[in-house]
Image (tube, helix red, strand yellow):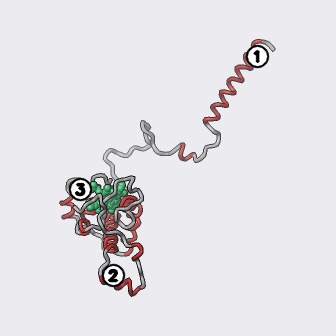
Amino acid sequence: MSKKFRAAVLFGLLLLTAGCSRQKSKPMLEYMPNMAHSPAVKAQERPMFLPATGTVPRDWEAYPYGPGDTLKAAAELVNPLPPTLEVLEAGRKSFNTFCIVCHGPKGDGRGYIIPKFPQPPSLLTDRVRNWPDGRIFHNISRGQQTMPDYAFQLDPAQRWAVVNYVRVLQRAARPTAADLALMKRLGIDFSEDEPDTSTPKLWPER
Ligand code: HEC
């Protein structure tokens, strides 16, 4: 074997092994390629079609009240949705998707994320019961302190549906005499899972 040939073989081996080690870090088979090559535009990358400056979705309307306009929003906004079964079902769906983690299934502030996230105040207090619908709507649209806003996740109709559902939770927490009579007549007993209407310790009645 000539020296030249030996060197060439060695070089070839080197190349191969280098190839091998590269193979290791980049497998031939891609598991879930959609995640590796997502269609999302990466930072510094130009998307194929940039929407014209100032473009908004077709039926998008700017929410006119700023974070500091709470009382104005509360006084002016009128709930356009009657509490039909359909609306309440939609409200429950959105509440159980976006609010439940913090506020809990009953709205008492005992969500699954608590106490990793600071416990929110109960939505069953007289404070929130006495708020006009518009104030709860504003709260969802603009957030409040550590609570983020849900203006992008929920369109206005979905937010009003959530407001109506919060009213359901409040009614369920303190049923009227008529509600109790009806439940008795229908043989319904919710006493096992009656929500705790007391304000959590962290949140004295304000
Ligand atoms: C990440 C946790 C979190 C989520 C999710 C969340 N909230 Fe809140 N919410 C809070 C906290 C914390 C407060 C108290 C904020 C403050 O005043 O410091 C609050 C306050 C409120 C209040 C005012 C209560 C009061 O007495 O001041 C309402 C009403 C409310 N949330 C409704 C909702 C609704 C409806 C949703 C779903 C669309 C929702 N929240 C989602 C954490 C959350």
Q: Quadrant of residue 27?
A: top right
Label 3: few (<14), some (14–19) or many (≥20) C-alpha neighbours in 10 Å? few
The residue at which mark 1 appears reads as 6
The residue at which mark 3 appears reads as 64
The residue at which mark 2 appears reads as 179
Above or below 45: residue 142:
below
Q: Quadrant of residue 142?
A: bottom left
Numbered disc 1: secondary structure: helix
Q: Nearer the viewer, residue 185 or 134?
A: 185
- Residue positioned 22% across, 64% down in the render: 77
Q: Nearer the viewer, residue 4 or 46?
A: 4
Q: Residue 41 location, x and y as percent? A: 45, 42
Looking at the rendered structure, the kind of residue marked 3 is Pro
Labels 3, 1: front one: 1
Looking at the rendered structure, the kind of residue marked 2 is Asp
Labels 1, 2: front one: 2
What is the CA distance from the residue labelled 3 to the residue labelled 2? 38 Å
Query: First in sequence: mark 1 or mark 2?
Result: 1
Q: Residue 204 location, x and y as percent? A: 25, 61
What is the CA distance from the residue labelled 3 to the residue labelled 1? 79 Å
Image marks 3 and 1: residues in contact by CB distance under 8 Å: no
- Residue positioned 65% across, 40% down in the render: 28
What is the CA distance from the residue labelled 1 to the residue labelled 2? 94 Å
Above or below 24: residue 131:
below
Query: First in sequence: mark 3 or mark 2?
Result: 3
Labels 3, 2: front one: 2
Image marks 1 and 2: residues in contact by CB distance under 8 Å: no
Q: Nearer the viewer, residue 105 or 118?
A: 118
Label 1: few (<14), some (14–19) or many (≥20) C-alpha neighbours in 10 Å? few
- What residue occupies the far right of the structure in this picture? 1
Where's the C terminus, which quadrant? bottom left
Q: Residue 146 location, x and y as percent? A: 30, 52
